[in-house]
Image: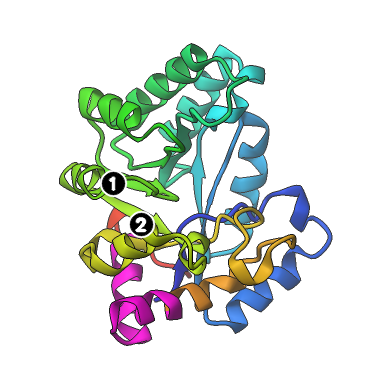
Amino acid sequence: MLIDSHVHLDAAEFAADRDEVIGAARAAGVQGFVVPAVDSDSFAAVLALAAARGDVCPALGIHPLYVTDAHEDDLDRLDEHLARGEAKAVGEIGLDHFVTDIDPARQLDFFVAQLRLARRHDLPVILHVRRAVDAVLKQVRRIGVRGGIAHAFNGSRQQAQMFIDLGFRLGFGGAMSFAGSSRIRELARTLPLSAIVLETDAPDMAPAWGQGERNDPANLARYAALLADLRGISREEVIETTGRNLREVLGGWTPG
């Protein structure tokens, strides 16, 4: 089953043609979409999308690049939603050490608080790890969660294995499409297929063939074919295995 493990369908970039974008992805073979929130203001939109569509799986969390405008009571709101069973994962959460104008201490405070909520509610997490893989691993290991997904993984083989040992899958997508992304392509080729899930991060992270354009979830079908080519296996095996990996992370969730 071909499922996009990370797509922001609630984003403003899709406001004018969201139904058409989803329809095009479905026509390309994408059967499900995991939609992570990025701040408390997006909780309602993500939940409404999931309520309207059986092929959307909601995740709720506060992204590290949005913590500047976040408030402590946003964590209380998140806790309430999780207590009602309204999300299948906590995310997108984590750390971002690439952007330098977001207070790293504030990022860490919100990340740790959300990891603790995930542990309390026994939910997987969807992790943002840009330039912060070791720092994220440290907190995940310290607090302990049920596993989840390291979104847009771009670390080393050793770091990948650390995530795998902690019960995580690793998200691969458009970065594989760049010939110069040799490390990512090598990881995609050689890591156990059981550790990989596919993602677009649409509308962001456009592939090599769509630079300067909006990224759409229909591209996931081409990512599956690309991963199959890198590994020398069938596209069907990639789709079946990565879909199963994602459903296992999400406690068996299957698109309706």
Where are the magenta residues, as a range? 225-247
**So how many labels did they put on this image?**
2
Q: Secondary structure at mark 2?
A: helix
Q: Which residue is mark 1?
A: 156
Q: Is residue 232 magenta?
A: yes
Quadrant position of residue 246: bottom left
Report the residue that reaches farthest toward the right. 16
- For the N terminus, give its image quadrant: bottom left
Q: Earlier in the sequence, mark 2 or mark 1?
A: 1
In percent of the image, x 35 and y 69: which residue is there?
Answer: 243
Question: Between marks 2 and 1, how big is the CA–CA gap?
Answer: 8 Å
Residue closer to the observer: 118 or 159: 159
Three-letter code for the amino acid on which mark 2 is drawn: Arg
Question: Going by the image, does 43 lie left or right of 118?
Answer: right
Would residue 246 be visible to someone looking at this image? yes
Q: Secondary structure at mark 1?
A: loop
| Mark 2 touches mark 1? (CB < 8 Å) | yes
Is residue 195 on the magenta stretch?
no
The residue that label 2 is drawn on is 183
Q: Position of residue 217 (x, y in %)?
A: 60, 67
Q: Position of residue 12 (x, y in %)?
A: 77, 49
Query: Residue 204 in the image: x percent, y percent?
Result: 64, 53
Q: Nearer the viewer, residue 94 or 96?
A: 96
Query: In this view of the protein, which residue sits in the foreground, 54 or 91?
Result: 91
Which corner quadrant of the image does residue 50 belong to? bottom right
The picture quadrant where one finds residue 245 is bottom left
- Quick check: 188 left or right of 74? left
Residue at left 35%, top 35%?
A: 133
Task: Provide the major secondary structure of the magenta segment.
Answer: helix
State the residue at coordinates (29%, 24%). 139
